[in-house]
Amino acid sequence: MTSSFVTPVTFGCDDVEMLSRETLYNGFFKMELYHFRYRLFNGGMSQTVTREILERGHAVVLLPYDARRDQVILLEQIRIAAYNSSLTPWLLELVAGIIEPGETLEQVARREAVEETGLAVGRCKRMLSYLASPGSTSERLTVMVGEVDALKASGIHGLVEENEDILLHAVSREQAYRWVEEGVIDNAASVIALQWLALHHESLRKEWTDNDNDNDNDNDNDKTLHA
């Protein structure tokens, strides 16, 4: 993955000697066995290291946000991986989906929003990207915020063929923050997205609502000219 910024870390990909990669399992996800050596901070190379890595592709997460009403849309659905570690395996999450070949990040966000919420997304903005759990998986998630109409968020959604059963919750931004603090929302993507919104909601609301007001004024002027 290339980037224009200068990283403060010491080494790069050239400082890893990839000895072999073996596919252990190849189903919906893929598990690979890596054998490699890497450059040490005190000089020289490490011994051969063996790691099992989950290769599940990369994904997009979308925070549906209504800037006019200052509300976010949360998705309640079952996540069986939370069964043994949480009070309930039904989590409050955001829209998310794996990137398919040839898709742009925005296309994934819009597709998944329709499938999981039934909502059309207006403007769409990239927040950030991060590695989900780099000790065990190569997955990188890109988090975005999308403009929606919270009044249209209702009902049960999801693809039947994927056994999805998703209930929507339209809540205030402040309520979502409280649920993060209380541990009600405890999945990484949702926490990270809401923390980003806490830092940037003022500028985002100004950007999106000011543009709406400009469009409304333009429409009013057009009506006056043609009256």
Image (cartoon, rainbow, N blue to C red):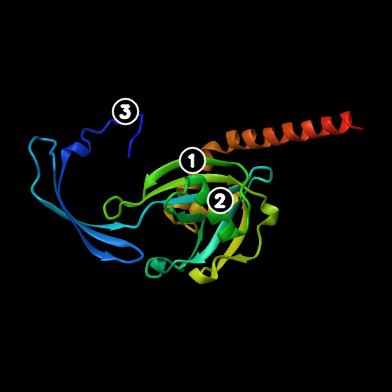
Query: Picture quarter containing residue 82?
Result: bottom left
- Answer whether residue 177 is visible to the viewer in this image: no
Query: Picture quarter containing residue 223?
Result: top right
Q: Residue 147, position in %: x, y?
A: 61, 45
Are the residues flagged by discs 1 and 2 in contact, CB closer than 8 Å?
A: no
Q: Secondary structure at mark 1?
A: strand
Left or right side of 93 for 153: right
- Answer whether residue 4 is visible to the viewer in this image: yes
| Amino acid, disc 1 | Met
The residue beneath circle 2 is 110
Q: How far apart, in angstroms, are the residues tagged by discs 1 and 2? A: 15 Å
Q: Residues within 10 Å of mark 2 (few under 14, many from 20)?
A: some
Q: Residue 216, position in %: x, y?
A: 77, 35
Are the residues flagged by discs 1 and 3 in contact, CB closer than 8 Å?
A: no
**Which one is earlier in the sequence, the residue at label 1 or at label 3?**
3
Are the residues flagged by discs 2 and 3 in contact, CB closer than 8 Å?
A: no
For image coordinates 46% across by 50% down, the residue present is 60
Left or right side of 47 for 163: right
Q: Residue furthest right?
A: 227
Camera-side residue: 168 or 179? Answer: 168
Which disc number belongs to residue 6? Answer: 3
**Which one is earlier in the sequence, the residue at label 1 or at label 2?**
2
Say above or below: 201 vs 90.
Answer: above
Q: How far apart, in angstroms, are the residues tagged by discs 1 and 3? A: 20 Å
The residue beneath circle 1 is 127
**Which one is earlier in the sequence, the residue at label 2 or at label 3?**
3
